[in-house]
Image: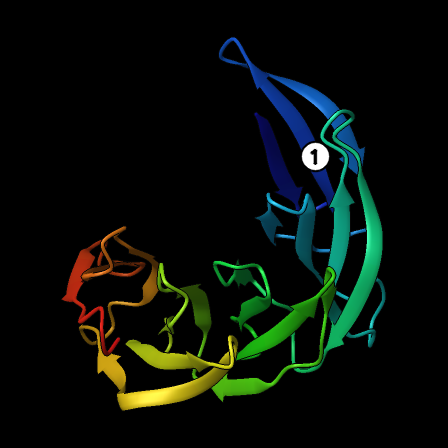
Amino acid sequence: PLVLVANAGDGSIATFRLAGGALERLALTPGLPGCSAFVVDAARDLVYAGVKGASEGEPAAVVTLGLDRATGGLTPRSRLEVAGGSLNYLALTPDGTGLLAASYGGGYGITCPILDGVVGEPVSRIEFANLHAVLPSPDGAHAYFVSLGDDLIAQYALEDGVRLRALEPETVAAPTDSGPRHLVLDASGDAVYVLTEFTAQVLHYARDAATG
């Protein structure tokens, strides 16, 4: 197994091999300024990394990298620039044809199609304060964003694989000033668990797997 680690301070991703309970560093891929979030498409040996601009005024981007499993090296393949702030959380639809992303500083979330590893222009955009994370449902039919600043979970159907359509209601409240930060869905799809930053709680939400 390989372990990838983002190093925001020096703008790189380190690749390690896990063997015998120990980590052996195989490669260090530079040129990824401010990278603190990435997602791996293991079926296609692709890594999608969120990066900041290399210099003041340069837009943030999502960089697609090919993964060499033998050497651990990552090779840039394509780049999509994004407006409004860097992305701090990335997720893939289960079939790998859509990218979901959240920007904490920019307060926005986007979804983008992927074709042959190339991330296309966003087809959906939402805005809430300090969006911190996003995940699709196990079947790829729905998506959930958590807003730390607005204390809520925003919920959507994924149409045409990646386009967001708000459910009714569009948002579900978290406790005031709890700061929802991360979320997971259980494998059966009937529960969502949200970790809060300011109150150190795990919130449990029941989920209708059919309607989202």
Residue under the image location 31 percent in, 67 percent down: 179
Residue 48 picture quarter: bottom right
Instruction: Judge from the rendering whether residue 139 lies leftward or rightward of residue 12; answer left or right.
Output: left
Q: Quadrant of the N terminus?
A: top right
Instruction: Judge from the rendering whether residue 34 lies leftward or rightward of residue 4; answer left or right.
Output: right
Crowd class of label 1 (few under 14; some 14 to 19; many from 20; radius 10 Å): some
Mark 1, secondary structure of its residue? strand
Residue 34 picture quarter: bottom right
The residue closer to the viewer here, 155 or 57, is 155
Examine the rendered structure and indicate whether residue 129 appears above or below residue 79: below
Examine the rendered structure and indicate whether residue 123 appears above or below residue 185: below
Query: Where is residue 88 drawn, in percent x and y?
Result: 56, 62
Residue under the image location 36 percent in, 89 percent down: 166
Which amino acid, by three-letter code, is at mark 1?
Ala
The residue closer to the viewer here, 58 or 19, is 19
Query: Where is residue 62 drawn, in percent x and y?
Result: 71, 64
Q: Is residue 124 visible?
A: yes
Residue under the image location 38 percent in, 76 percent down: 149
Residue under the image location 58 percent in, 67 percent down: 99
Query: Where is residue 211 drawn, in percent x and y?
Result: 23, 78
Instruction: Judge from the rendering whether residue 184 lies leftward or rightward of residue 15; answer left or right.
Output: left
The residue closer to the viewer here, 130 or 77, is 77
Q: Is residue 10 visible?
A: no
Q: Quadrant of the C terminus?
A: bottom left
- Check the image and name the residue furthest to the top: 20
Q: Which residue is mark 1?
A: 14
Q: How was the colour assigned to the protein in this rendering?
A: rainbow
Residue 70 picture quarter: top right
Query: Where is residue 157 drawn, in percent x and y?
Result: 37, 81
* Number of residue marks: 1
